[in-house]
Amino acid sequence: MQESMARNTEQSSSESPKIFNNQDFYALRELHLKKGVLFQDEEFPADLRVIGPHLIDELKIQNMQWRRPPEFCKNPHLIVDGASYFDILQNKIGDCWVLSTIGSVTQKQNLLIKIIPADQGFTKNYIGIFHFRFWCSGEWVDVVIDDRLPFVNGDFFSVRPSCTKEYWPCLLEKAYAKLLGGYQNLHWGDPAEAMVNFTGALTMTLKLKGGDLHPSDIWEMVHKSKHTALITCISEKADIMTRNRSYSVPNALEYRDERRGSEPANYPENIQIDNGLVDRHAYTVTDTAQVYREGLVNLIRLWNPWGRGEWIGRWSDNCSWWNDINPEDRKKLNTKREDGEFWIPWVNFVQQFSRIIICSPTLDFLNWGSDQTSWHKTAYKNIWPKECGLEDSFNKDLFCKNPQYLIWITPSDEVKKGYNVIISLMQNHRNRQKFGHEWLPIGFLVSKVGAELPDPQMKMPGSFFPKDLQSGIHIKKRRDVTKGFRLAAGRYVITPFNADRNQESSFLLQVFLRSQGCTVELGDSQSFLRNEEKTHEDIFMKYATQGGKMNARDLQKFLNDVISKGFAPHGGIRFSIEASRSMLASMDFTCNGKLECDFFKRLWRYLDYFKAIFTDADVDGSGFIGLEELSKAVKTAGIAVSSDQLTILLLRYGDYEMKLNFEDYLCCMVRLKSAFKRFQMLTSDGKGVYLSHDKWLKIMMSC
């Protein structure tokens, strides 16, 4: 699968992830080793605050102890004889949606080593600090934790390791809880969300009954991709669409709270039913097989995160039917032990389970029933502006102001079976903390375009959308919305939207097509070209009037034409010439008073990135941020700045109330980022540099 990015932020990989919460694992470990003091994570403290009030109330927690493994285990290890899903035992909280995903990850060792770095443990350089890596909002992040684990009444509070000396499941889950904002966000959830965080790959949730695909097609997908994909499933009554709360939305538009993807093991309604399965529960798919007994039988193997509780129907461990198949197959497949893993016939699986979730770094599993083909991804990071959500009478003139993306399907891309388009929309992961532990209601609309080719530099107007549009809109109150389509040849407009018209937030849209370069953003001056690098160069040449270089006036025009789009608190923003001069000086590494193309492209990436951060930091939507919000913004950008330095920045760039507007904020962040870049250029060890008076003065005046 080939990828391209548009309106991209600075990219990271699992090998060089971004630092989460400005906590550098190696620097912190070195510091605490020198001090000889065990690390204590103040960003995720060992107290009830990280458990969360909702979970404390629901489980009636009164006292909690925090203990490091060396305090209760003589010789603890991070991993013993390799990581396996048999190392995991679900305990008090409803985290089966996470544990089923982790169980899948253990089957992909090349992925597991990306998530659990090998440079840590309880022996060499142990100082109570560990780190793990997750994919979050389009980039990999490195999350640091200490090893203090929560206990209630002498027992593990969350996941329990099956081996008394092995603690990777507990520490990995603690790091994930930190990423999500607390342990209470592990209590009920959607396995699809966890799969995205653990892989960064496309994740598809497929209905086993009443969905777009026939169960036989889904079997083919699962059987074909079992060695490359992560696969989980949810038992029948765990259907996240059957136990939802309804919300009142004008004009009968409804969205559902889909946070509860599966229920906790000890939840009163979460019981083991007569056939051995657990009601409302997530399982890991560990294998598939085909055997012959009076014809071909399709089998699927599942693992229960409880570590016990197995299917007792046909083809269960002790079923006599195993005696009727080939002895070699029986020896290979029929393992009799109470470990939570079991075989179930596909026909019974479809009856007993509601959904299956497939996550794969490649999209080959979507090519069943058709010729093998490559898939191409285009990703956009953008912002939903305020006042563009759904309102009382579905105002199409407001709705059309949402970002719009044009795709086209060629005749050769048409398929008779399966999908030829996958669309995935993800809202910012911080929204759940910002909006009362609930996700914003989001969705996207796919609309067919007529024969006339739209102008890529113009959005489709409100009149483009039909009058009865609201009857076909489905809104989901969840982090990710992903759907496959089988579209006929033609052009289509994708309109992602946030149904809460009072909230502004960033999002990530990913479009997967069979043909490359068939996605553009409408109404954006750079979107009509398909290659990002070519786009940046052409846009640069469009505005540069100084023989291939930009002056301050050129940059000001670009800022007002491009960067100010999508940001409109209090009537919009216009960049001044002073702001343009400040940004140009910060990026003018050659000190010639003009901006060259390479530095312009870097500045553009910075601006898009900082723009998305501002939107998330400005919680009240005032168009201004203060010291606390600036501190969060700087941390998100991965820049280490002390509180005293932040105060100085506010004095330099803020107003009389010590607040930054959008223009001053961008000038501040660009200067701060470029200052760090210059420092890195001038030092070899990242710690210090000697400057002459002339060089110091030159940097101070130009940065």
Image: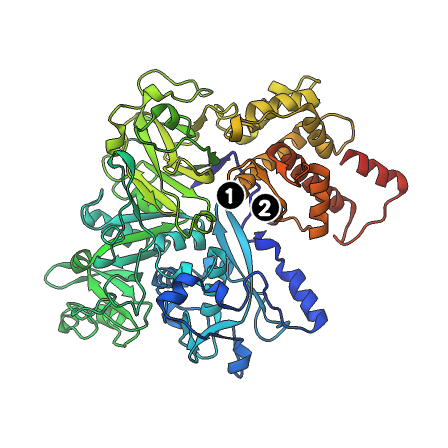
- Furthest-front residue in this view: 657
What amino acid is labelled 2 in the image?
Glu
Q: Which mark is residue 619?
A: 1
Classify 10 Å Cα crowding around label 1: few (below 14), some (14-19), many (20 and above): some
Distance between mark 2 and mark 1 Cα atoms: 9 Å
**Quadrant of the image occupied by residue 474:** top left
Whether 168 is drawn above or below 357: the answer is: below
Q: Is residue 281 left or right of residue 200?
A: left
Picture mark count: 2
What amino acid is labelled 1 in the image?
Val
Q: Which residue is mark 2?
A: 629
Mark 2 secondary-structure assignment: helix
Query: Residue at left 57%, top 41%?
Result: 10
Is residue 281 in view from this perspective?
yes
Q: Which sits in the foreground, 654 or 676? A: 654
Point out residue 371 in the picture as x, y percentages from the top left corner: 30, 39
Classify 10 Å Cα crowding around label 2: few (below 14), some (14-19), many (20 and above): some
- Furthest-bottom residue in this view: 74
Query: Residue at left 70%, top 29%?
Result: 584
**Quadrant of the image occupied by residue 125:** bottom right
